[in-house]
C-alpha cells in the first residue's frame, strides 16, 4: 500500500461516518487536509508502538510526542515526506480508566479476530471487535469520552483539521459559512480530543449524530467526531499550522 492510497482509505472511512462533511462544498473537494486526528489505545496491536513501524513504511516520521496526563493521552505528531496531510495519533492510556471500564474495554478489544490484527489498514477497516451494548457504552463514555468512542468506532479517524490559510479563506469567514451549513462550533475543546495551543485560532465542529445499532440490537444516536478549523495567529511563522497545534508545555522528549 502506498501513502496516497492509505490516506484515501482513511478519508473514505471518515466521510462514511461523517456524510455531512462529505457533502460540504465550502472549499474544493480536493482541498488539502492539514491533518487527521487518529484515536487508538495502548493495547497491542493497536498501540502507537505497534503502529509506528507501519506508518514509517508509508513515509511518516514522528516529529514530536506529547503527554496529557489530565486526559489520559499520549500523542504523536507524524510528518509526511512532502507537503501532504500530517497525522496526529492520540493514544488513550487504559491505565487512566478505573478498574471496571478498563476491564470492559480490554475485554472488547481482546475479542478482535486475529485476521483483523494484521495489515496496513488497521486504522481504516472499521471496529474490529463486537459492538458493546448500550449500558457498557454509557459506562465507558462516562469514564472517558474517548473510551466510549473507541468502543463503537475502533482505532480510526476522529476528526479532520483544515488550515484556513491553505484553503485561501479567513477563519471568521469559514466559521460563519460552516454555521450557515448547520455546523455549530464547540467551545469545549474536550470534544475535540486535544488541548490546543494559543498560537492558533481554533474551533471544533461536531458532526451530526449517527444512529448506531448496539450489541443488544437497540439503536441510539451518538456523535462520532467532527472537523476542526485552524489558522495561525502569526502568519510569519514558517511551520505548518499543525506543527503549532498542541501546547508546547505538553511536549516531551523523543526516545
Image: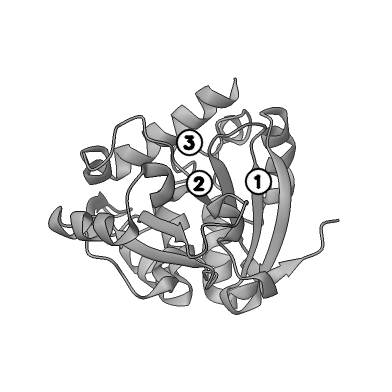
Q: Residue drawn at (15%, 52%), measured in percent from left and top?
A: 181
Residue 215 vertical position relative to residue 13 in the rendered view, above or below: below
Which residue is disc 2 drawn over? 35
Q: Residue drawn at (45%, 28%), measured in percent from left and top?
A: 8
* Mark 3 or mark 2: whose residue is earlier in sequence: 2
Which corner quadrant holds the C terminus?
A: bottom right
Residue 218 in sight in this render: no
Foreground of the two, 241 or 68: 241
Q: Residue drawn at (82%, 63%), measured in percent from left and top?
A: 253
* Mark 1 or mark 3: whose residue is earlier in sequence: 1
Q: Of helix, strand and loop, which one carries label 1?
A: strand
Q: Residue drawn at (31%, 63%), measured in percent from left and top?
A: 134
Q: Residues within 10 Å of mark 2 (few under 14, many from 20)?
A: many
Judged from this view, the residue extending furthest toward the front is: 236
Mark number, residue 124 = 3
Name the image quarter holding residue 113: top right
Foreground of the two, 217 or 43: 43
Q: Of helix, strand and loop, which one carries label 3?
A: loop
Residue 46 vertical position relative to residue 64 in the rendered view, above or below: above
Q: CA distance from mark 2 to mark 1?
A: 9 Å
Which residue is disc 1 drawn over? 78
Foreground tag (1 vs 3): 1
Residue 27, given in percent of the width and then of the height, sits at 28, 39
Mark number, residue 119 = none
7 vs 2, left or right, is: left
Q: Are marks 1 and 3 in contact (CB under 8 Å)?
A: no
Residue 109 in sight in this render: yes
Q: Residues within 10 Å of mark 3 (few under 14, many from 20)?
A: many
Amino acid at each position: 500500500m502506498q501513502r496516497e492510497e492509505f490516506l484515501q482509505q482513511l478519508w473514505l472511512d471518515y466521510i462514511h461516518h461523517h456524510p455531512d462533511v462529505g457533502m460540504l462544498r465550502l472549499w474544493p473537494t480536493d482541498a488539502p487536509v492539514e491533518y487527521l486526528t487518529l484515536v487508538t489505545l495502548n493495547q497491542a496491536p493497536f498501540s502507537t508502538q505497534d503502529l509506528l513501524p507501519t506508518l514509517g513504511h508509508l513515509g511518516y516520521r514522528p516529529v514530536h510526542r506529547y503527554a496529557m496526563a489530565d486526559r489520559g493521552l499520549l500523542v504523536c505528531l507524524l510528518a509526511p515526506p512532502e507537503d501532504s496531510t500530517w497525522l496526529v495519533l492520540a493514544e488513550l492510556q487504559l491505565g487512566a480508566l478505573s478498574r471496571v471500564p478498563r476491564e470492559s474495554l480490554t475485554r472488547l478489544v481482546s475479542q478482535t479476530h486475529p485476521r483483523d490484527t494484521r495489515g496496513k489498514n488497521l486504522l481504516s477497516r472499521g471496529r474490529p471487535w463486537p459492538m458493546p451494548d448500550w449500558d457498557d457504552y454509557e459506562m465507558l463514555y462516562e469514564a472517558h469520552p474517548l473510551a466510549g468512542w473507541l468502543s463503537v468506532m475502533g482505532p480510526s479517524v476522529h476528526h479532520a483539521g483544515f488550515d484556513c490559510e491553505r484553503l485561501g479563506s479567513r477563519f471568521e469567514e469559514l466559521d460563519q459559512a460552516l454555521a450557515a451549513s448547520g455546523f455549530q462550533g464547540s467551545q469545549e475543546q474536550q470534544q475535540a480530543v486535544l488541548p490546543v495551543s494559543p498560537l492558533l485560532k481554533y474551533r471544533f465542529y461536531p458532526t451530526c449524530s449517527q444512529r448506531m445499532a448496539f450489541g443488544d440490537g437497540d439503536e441510539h444516536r451518538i456523535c462520532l467526531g467532527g472537523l476542526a478549523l485552524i489558522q495561525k495567529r502569526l502568519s510569519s511563522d514558517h511551520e505548518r499550522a499543525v506543527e503549532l497545534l498542541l501546547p508546547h508545555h505538553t511536549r516531551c522528549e523523543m526516545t
